[in-house]
Every structure is written in structure tokens, then in C-alpha cells.
Amino acid sequence: MTGRLLAGSRVVRRTLVLGAVAALATGLAVAGTPRANAAADTLGAAAAQTGRYFGTAISASKLGDPVYTAIAGREFTMVTPENEMKLDATEPRQGVFNFGPGDRVYDWAAQNGKQVRGHTLLWHSGQPQWLQNLSGSALRQAMIDHIDGVMAHYKGKIYAWDVVNEAFADGTGGRRNSNFQRTGDDWIEHAFRAARAADPAAKLCYNDYNIENWTSAKTQSVYTMVKDFRSRGVPIDCVGIQAHFTSGNPYPGDFRTTLRNFAALGVDVQITELDIQGAPPATYADVVTDCLTVPRCTGVTVWGVRDTDSWRSGDTPLLFDGDGDKKPAYTAVLDALNAAVPGPSPSPTPSPAGSCTATLSAGAKWPDRYNLGVTVTGSDDWIVTMTVPRPAKIIATWNVSARWNPTTNVMTARPDGHGDSWGVTIKHHGNRTWPTVSCRHA
Ligand code: 9MR
């Protein structure tokens, strides 16, 4: 019953027998349910107590501003480069990649213990001129080469990629007319397949705006696409809902329904670019609470730190004012996060045929750590991703081949020949909230 835990390039071998012996010797086995957590005083810590992340968009050009980095470093656990991983930034000339700005954001995030959402591989906007000039099979090949090139550079480092951004038209629900779309309807699924091959550890998301309202034609079209992808085994793990709310595009009363319905397709949902005109505290709290009620809503990202950092600063839509002071919306969000009931990871959403499910069960407990059993169903060649809420961390595994990323606090596990039941030991450091797990075919 030995465990193998790869930390970076180092191989750490541990035996759970040792842990069990130690517990027996000291008679410290602990029974009972996890304790409720105390209220957290940052957005990231409060979200982590629910097994979720709380993120922000970050601009490389602002990383020299100490007020900006102090807030971002303190409050957020997920970072989305606001512009630095877009097409025009990363491939300014065909086949010539520039990862300088993207790396500056990535490195800042990693050095500060934050995960990164990659944004975005294919988007009709922000294309370099050479790409706009291509069409047909040459364009299709360039799209795939772009995915391969960018994902190879960040392989194993990205929590989730927005593989395709904003591919549907407003109003009608049809596909947006773009050079990508003119290469054929199947460009999106080809992009997702290429992305899975390029970095099997990253969650692959479709990301869009104006898909918050369940009844809108655009939401329905995206839903139909994701459902089709899931039923045909096209690799998609998540839907990013941007949530840029204005008086013309207000927060809809059925937002929770939208989150729940996407999640029921067997994908994670994430609120990826939240900002609300005027930052009304009650609306901010409602949006966050909607996410907290949907087990597979794995996190919320606001689109910038201070109002003055916003792409629409005149709307003062964020959680910090231009001086870096907390706004009433900040307190509303923190309170909403702290009001969530901590506890075991929610039971997984039933998965459609062709996908897999990882289910957690309680194991032995000690004062400083606890065991979880994991059972995988629906596949015999799977990849399970386990995100551990900080400051807890996995210190051992058994019957599985696992790689632990100490920077992101995420473990990626594959079968090691011992079947589909395995386990982990978690040193909780005071946070007993169970990790979140997701499963997909290898
Ligand atoms: O906030 C981003 C702004 O700085 C850029 O100028 C703009 C164009 O690249 O993109 C903004 O971010 C967009 C995001 O990438 C996709 N969804 C809409 C966001 C707001 O326009």
C-alpha cells in the first residue's frame, strides 16, 4: 500500500502504513465530522473554505504598482491575464511566439501561490494581421498551430484554458460570423480536440458573454453545443460565463438556473469576468451566492482589481475603488462567501455516457490530517484532478500514480494498475474542507 507522489521533478515515496502506525502508537485517531470554519477575511480564503477559487484579471503593465499588487496578492487565488495570452500578444507573426507579457503575469501568479486561467486561445477579436489575412485550410491549420504553440509553452501550468471565446452571435443564437467560422462549423470541436492533446492536465472551457439569462437564444445555443460535445465525446470540461452586467444587460433572476443547467451536462461552470455597473452590493452578493448553490460552479473571477483598472472604469463596476479601498460590494461578496456552509464536497453531478465520475468517501482521521477514498466510475483510463483548498495539502497517496503541483495546490492522478479505488492523505493545517474533484477520460 505504498503511495507515489511526484512533487515537481522530485519523487516522494511515502507509505500510509507509517501514518497508520504513528496514529496507533499515539492513540490519536479522531472521529466525528469536520468543524465549521471561522469567517475568513479575504475573498480567496473565504472562497477556499467552500472549495472554490476567487480570481481577478491581472495586467502585466500594472505589476509595478504596489497598491495593485498588494490587493491582488492578498485577496485573490486565481489570476486571468487580462490581455497577455490573447492571439495578438502571443503570436504576433505566424509561428513566432512571444510569451514575455504572458509569462510576467504567470510568474507573478505562481510566485504568489495563485492558479492561472488561460485566456484565450481562439477569439475573433484581437487577431494579428497575418491571421486575419488567412482563410480556408491554411487558417484552420494556423488555428491549430496556435493552440499547440501556446499550450505547449504553458503545459501543466494552467488550471483552465478558455479554448474558444465568444463564438456565438448576440440575439439570434447563431454562430458569430468570423474568419474562424468561415472555415466550417466544426472549428470549435477541432480546437477542443487539439487543446486536449496539447495539455491533458488543463480544464478546457468555452467562454462567452450574454449567456447569463437562461431563456436567451444565445444561452440556448451554447447549451446545445456543450450538450452535443458531451454526448459525442468532444473534450470540454467547463463553461465560462463572463457576467459583464450593465443596466442594458442586467443580472437575470434565472442566472442560477443557467449555472445549474450547464453543470448538469457534466461540466464545471465558472463566472469568468464579473463586473457590474455601479457595483450594487446586493447584486454582487446574489451572483456569488448563485455560484455557491451550484456544486460544479468552481469559482468566480472579477474583471480587474480597482475601478480604475477596469476596461469600463466609468461604470465603477469592481470591488475596490481607485484608491484601493474596499467598496460596499466587497463586503457583500465576502459576507456571501462566509455565509456558505462548509463541508464535504458535494456529490458529483451524474455524468452522461462517455464520461467518468470520481466520488470521495471519508477515511481515517487524525488531529492533523485525514484520509479520503476515491472511487472512479465510468472509465478505466482516467485523469482525476483534485483541487485542495489552501492551506491544506496532499501528503500521500495510495494505489494511484499522482503528480502534486505545490504551486497550484492541485493533484493530477492516473491509474497505476491497482484499479479504480485509491486514496489520499490530506494534511489540513486547520482547513478541513474537502477538495473538489473532476474526472475525465485519458
Ligand atoms: O479588458 C480587456 C481590455 O483591456 C482589452 O482592451 C479588450 C480587447 O482585447 O479585452 C478586454 O477583455 C475582454 C475579454 O478578453 C473577453 N470578454 C470581454 C472583455 C471585455 O471587453
Image (cartoon, rainbow, N blue to C red):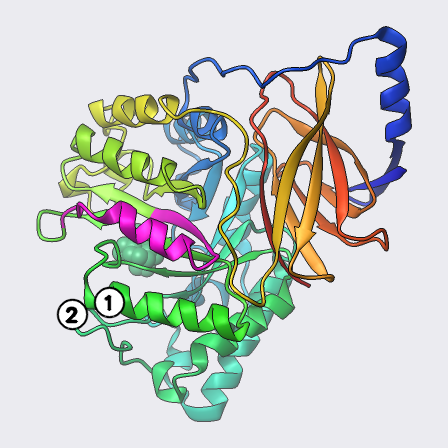
Tally of marks? 2
Does the stretch in magenta take in 433?
no
Residue for badge 2: 171
Q: Nearer the viewer, residue 364 or 442?
A: 364
Secondary structure type for disc 2: loop
Tell me if I can see residue 94 in this picture: no
User: Hey, which residue is sitting farthest bottom in the picture?
Assistant: 136
Q: How far across and how far down the image is residue 93, in percent?
A: 49, 75
Measured from the top left, where is residue 296 in percent x and y?
Answer: 45, 46
- Residue 58 versus residue 405: which sits nearer the camera? 405
Question: Residue 234 appears at what percent x and percent y?
Answer: 53, 72
Residue 264 magenta-drawn?
Answer: yes
Query: Could you tell me if residue 312 is visible in this image?
Result: yes
The magenta region covers: 250-272
Given the image, on which type of amino acid does mark 1 rest? Answer: Lys
Among numbered discs 1 and 2, the one appearing first in the sequence = 2
Q: Which mark is residue 218?
A: 1
Image coordinates for residue 364, horizontal then vertical, percent: 74, 24
The numbered dot on residue 288 is none
* Contact, mark 1 vs mark 2 (Cβ under 8 Å): yes
- Ligand 1 quadrant in view: bottom left
